[in-house]
Image: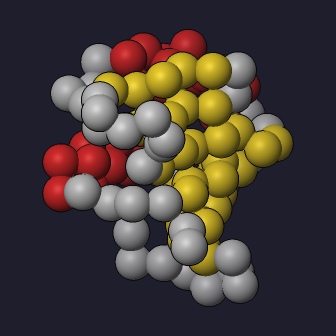
Amino acid sequence: MSAELYIEFENTNWLNDNKKLLEDYFSKMKIYVEIMENEYRLKQRDNPYYDVRFMIINDSTILFEIAYLPKIIEEEIVTLLAWIREKTQITIKDEDGIVSNW
């Protein structure tokens, strides 16, 4: 069973304006990242499936889905979210619309 969270961007232009910057960030992570069209899959190299994925679902929202969360990936996500927060305002909500403490 996976957990679904949504990263909502206050500035609705930020994702479109900074998609390349975001893609560059994912490509420099310490863990394996599979980059696809509007989707970034984080996983351990020996895992054929993703552990966590980020999928751009519209101009102001990224789906953040956790299937499995090893410590190394959790650390990378915390760093990623801090990096995004340095650049723009975001709110993270669960699938019920409740603000998450991520």
Quarter holding residue 7: bottom right
Most distant residue in the right direction: 58
Quarter holding residue 1: bottom right
Tell me if residue 7 can be seen. Answer: no
Picture residue at 65% right of the left edge, 41% below the top: 55
Residue 39 to residue 24: above or below: below
Q: Which of 51/8 is in front?
A: 51
Residue 14 to residue 9: above or below: above
- Residue 44 percent coordinates (x, y): 29, 37
Picture residue at 48% right of the left edge, 23% below the top: 34
Picture residue at 42% right of the left edge, 49% below the top: 51
Callout count: 0
- Residue 47 percent coordinates (x, y): 37, 39
- Quarter of the picture containing the C terminus is bottom left
In the picture, measured across the screen, residue 4 lies left or right of residue 57, that is left
Q: Which of 45/91 is in front?
A: 45
In the picture, measured across the screen, residue 19 lies left or right of residue 84, that is right
Residue 47 to residue 35: above or below: below
Picture residue at 63% right of the left edge, 21% below the top: 36
Task: State the scheme by which the image is colored.
Answer: secondary structure
Tell me if residue 95 can be seen. Answer: yes
Residue 9 to residue 69: above or below: above
- Residue 73 percent coordinates (x, y): 27, 48
